């Protein structure tokens, strides 16, 4: 393996899960219960049986989420039902502002990357997917569509955990 390739592999392994992979193979249609347990700085994979409420989020080709601001209680497990009402691929990825910004930059360089983490939903036009997430830490977190150009166009929302 060449030095450049070895450095790229090492860099990708060091990145958070959100930046390692990308694509439309996501969990569209997969049951949230089948997701692996993942712990992050903004929470962990939620147990669908313990979801306290369902929040419906619409994604559109206007490069917006609706709603674009959500408030949850620390420790609350939320089921996000994410619908793509547009004609192009969209996604909802949870994370810190820095993680989303870094991932968006990575996507500009490697737009074909594939991934499937429990805090992501890749949703084709006219389709719906789910994320079940437990917010274990108080603070401000975000969700964004990191398809190239979408985040930069304003496709980002905020989650306040109290």
Image (tube, rainbow, N blue to C red):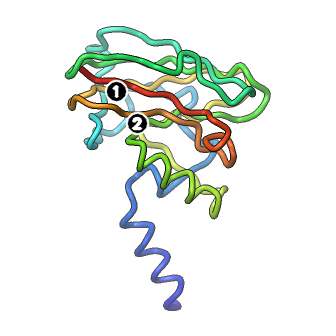
Is 130 on the left-hand or right-hand side of 22?
left
Q: Residue at x 67, y 49 (%)?
A: 148
Q: Position of residue 20 (x, y in %)?
A: 47, 58
Does 76 appear above or below 114? above
**Residue 45: x %, y % from top left:** 31, 32
Provide residue 93's location: percent of width, then percent of height: 49, 37
Mark number for residue 33?
none
Q: Quadrant of the C terminus?
A: top left
The answer to the question of whether label 2 and label 1 lie on touching residues, with beta carbons closer than 8 A, is yes
Tell me: 91 left or right of 20: right
Vertical position of residue 62 compared to residue 149: above or below: above
The front one of 5 and 32 is 5
Residue beneath the point at 62% across and 35% down: 154
Between marks 2 and 1, how big is the CA–CA gap?
A: 8 Å
The x, y position of residue 132, in whole percent, is 38, 24
- Identify the element where label 1 is drawn: strand
Q: Earlier in the sequence, mark 2 or mark 1?
A: 2
Count of numbered marks: 2
Report the residue marked by disc 1.
133
Q: Residue at x 59, y 44 (%)?
A: 146
> Which residue matches tag 2?
118
């Amino acid at each position: 393996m060449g030095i450049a390739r070895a450095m790229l592999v090492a860099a990708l392994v060091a990145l958070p899960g959100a930046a390692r992979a990308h694509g439309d193979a996501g969990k569209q249609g997969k049951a949230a219960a089948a997701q692996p347990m993942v712990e992050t700085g903004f929470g962990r994979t939620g147990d669908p049986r313990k979801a306290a409420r369902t929040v419906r989020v619409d994604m559109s080709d206007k490069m917006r989420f609706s709603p674009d601001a959500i408030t949850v209680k620390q420790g609350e497990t939320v089921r996000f039902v994410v619908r793509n009402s547009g004609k192009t691929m969209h996604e909802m990825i949870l994370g810190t502002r820095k993680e989303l910004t870094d991932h968006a930059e990575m996507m500009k360089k490697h737009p074909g990357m594939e991934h499937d983490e429990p805090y992501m939903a890749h949703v084709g036009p006219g389709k719906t997917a789910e994320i079940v997430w437990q917010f274990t830490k108080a603070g401000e977190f975000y969700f964004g569509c990191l398809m190239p150009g979408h985040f930069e166009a304003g496709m980002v929302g905020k989650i306040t955990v109290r």
